[in-house]
Image (spheres, helix red, strand yellow):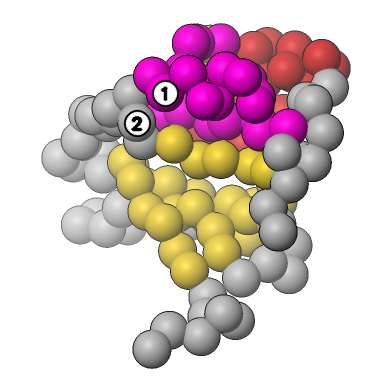
């Protein structure tokens, strides 16, 4: 059984880690928890982002020797439950950082939030509902 306080990492490829950092850190407000600082042959470049002190994070990877093209689907979602409508200022920052506002594949998310594709095409939903 997995406990509620178990740490979780979600990993996925990115074309451009600097663009991902602008989107998730500078615009959304997550923290850089770790990054590779030097190029090591045979190893991936990494950017780990998440909330300070949180129990989850994204590990965004880039393999310069054998790059993967991200292949998000319309239902690959990262949902943030804000408990209120998303501020227009936040949406504007995400768009300025390379995001694209898109209609949700599932209309539920358009009723209860805003969907923005990140620079790699993965979808972030800013949900106005609370999770409880």
Q: Which residue occupies the foreground of this view, 73 or 48?
A: 73
Q: Residue at x 61, y 70 (%)?
A: 55
Identify the element where label 2 is drawn: loop
Residue 42 pos. (x, y %): 20, 57
Among numbered discs 1 and 2, the one appearing first in the sequence: 2
Q: Residue shown at 56%/64% (left/top)?
A: 56
- Residue 129: percent from left, percent from top: 71, 39
Contact (Cβ within 8 Å) of mark 1 with mark 2: yes
Residue at the spot of label 2: 75
Q: Is residue 118 visible?
A: no
Residue 106 higher or lower than 49, as above or below: above
Q: Secondary structure at mark 1?
A: loop
Q: Nearer the viewer, mark 1 or mark 2?
A: 1
Using residue 87 as the reference point, say whether residue 91 is left or right of it. left
User: Which residue corresponds to the image point at 47% horizontal and 18% vertical from the top-left?
Assistant: 107
- Where residue 106 is drawn, which disc sits there? 1
Write the start and end of the magenta stretch as one range. Answer: 101-128
Q: Is residue 100 visible?
A: yes
């Amino acid at each position: 059984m997995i406990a509620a306080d178990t740490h979780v990492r979600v990993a996925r490829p990115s074309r451009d880690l600097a663009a991902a950092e602008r989107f998730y850190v500078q615009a959304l407000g997550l923290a850089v928890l770790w990054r590779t600082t030097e190029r090591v042959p045979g190893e991936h470049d990494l950017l780990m982002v998440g909330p300070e002190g949180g129990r989850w994070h994204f590990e965004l990877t880039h393999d310069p020797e054998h790059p993967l093209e991200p292949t998000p689907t319309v239902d690959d979602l990262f949902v943030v439950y804000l408990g209120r409508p998303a501020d227009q200022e936040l949406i504007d920052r995400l768009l300025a950082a390379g995001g694209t506002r898109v209609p949700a594949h599932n209309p539920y998310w358009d009723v209860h939030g805003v969907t923005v594709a990140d620079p790699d095409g993965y979808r972030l939903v800013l949900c106005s509902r609370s999770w409880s």
